[in-house]
Amino acid sequence: MQQRKIIHVDMDAFYASVELHDRPELRGQPVVVAWDSIRSVICAASYEARRYGLHSAMSVAKARRLCPHAVYIPPNFERYRAVSRQVHAIFARYTHTIEPVSLDEAYLDVSNYQGPLPYARDIARAIRTDIFTETGLTASAGIAPNKFLAKIASDWRKPNGQFVIAPAQITAFLQSLPIGKIPGVGKVTQQKMHRLGWHTVGDLAKIDRRILIQHFGRWGYRLYEFARGRDNRIVQSNAVRQQISNEITLEQDENRIEIRRHLPTLALTLMQQMQRRQLTGYCLTLKLKTNDFHIHTRSQTFSSPLYTQAALIQAGQQLLSRMPSDQIYYRLIGLGISQFDSRSHQPELWSEDEMAYPVTSD
Ligand SMILES: [Mg+2]
């Protein structure tokens, strides 16, 4: 099984750093990027401002109390977008599998890198050097076998640092990691987990999946995987289509009962399309077009990825049963899949417990 190499690159205090770079006379002063209104919130705080407890999303009213002498600069998103494009162009020298998360953050999959640098950590360092040389700004990077760990790692040596979580280190690293470090676990979730007696990711790994789902709903599935250092989500570059789909235009209009017979063909094609790309998907979408050209779609996200023809047919039938039926005739049926995982990292076998069943719809 091939191990993936993912880099998460995160610019340091991005908006504030751009402003400081453009106005060197402000260096050393607490700088806050925010619209200057008592009702607005901070977009970014420089590291100097953070020493006073200021941080992004804090209200300007509160920031003014904590640090009355901070310098306020209104955001200039056009400028940030321009720098972001520059940084993106640097990424593209090293890989084409780039998933921008925001203007200052991106995941890179460098598993297929064929250049002269021996390790992913060297690629990360080269990228950070290029960014600094060409923009004057610093970035931090996390290097790991998946997105979840790479994201945590990029925060580990911030600012202007990088950190590697190698496969052999994952369990030990997570054991004592505070749960608040899990991306997506905010203050409220953290408090809830603390009340349940869970403080580290190691604690979380001891919890039954059913309990996690009971407390956190769909997010429980992810938490269960995260606690084990697992995350199969692919780095979704714009080049990878967000959905794989195929459709059949009928020679004669068919009703909802008749049209069902096309599901096996659609499911088979979909399965083959996924196999070719080494992908599996969590979300299935059924599309029907009526003979008067109205389009109906139904979607369902499942607890584990769908990749067999049987699973796709079964899920397709569920979606079809939710389509309008009375006196309606259809001229087209399509089946699409999205929310991809990397197939090469799926366990070969799924236990009964891990069979796919719906967790959300539409
Ligand atoms: Mg950042």
Image (cartoon, rainbow, N blue to C red):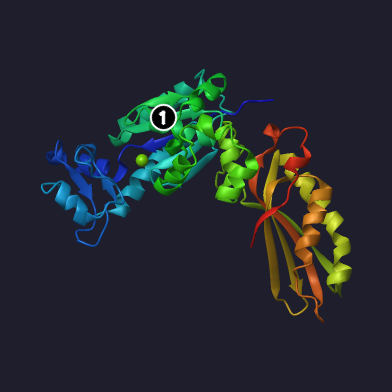
Which quadrant of the frame does ligand 1 lie within? Answer: top left
Above-or-below relation of 325 to 350? below
Above-or-below relation of 82 to 320? above
Residue at image coords 78%, 68%: 332
Q: Position of residue 309 (x, y in %)?
A: 83, 48
Q: Position of residue 245 (x, y in %)?
A: 72, 55
Front-most of 149 and 35? Answer: 149
- Residue that lies at the very extreme toward the bottom in this rendered image: 327
Above-or-below relation of 113 to 151? above
- In this view of the protein, can residue 234 be seen by the observer? no
Quarter-wise, where is residue 266 in the image?
A: bottom right
Q: Along the horizontal axis of the image, is 251 left or right of 1?
A: right
Q: Along the horizontal axis of the image, is 106 left or right of 348?
A: left
Residue at image coords 86%, 61%: 262
Q: Along the horizontal axis of the image, is 161 left or right of 52?
A: right
Disc 1 packing (10 Å; few <14; some 14–19; many ≥20) = many
Q: Position of residue 336 (x, y in %)?
A: 71, 56
Residue at image coords 51%, 26%: 175
Helix, strand or loop at mark 1:
helix
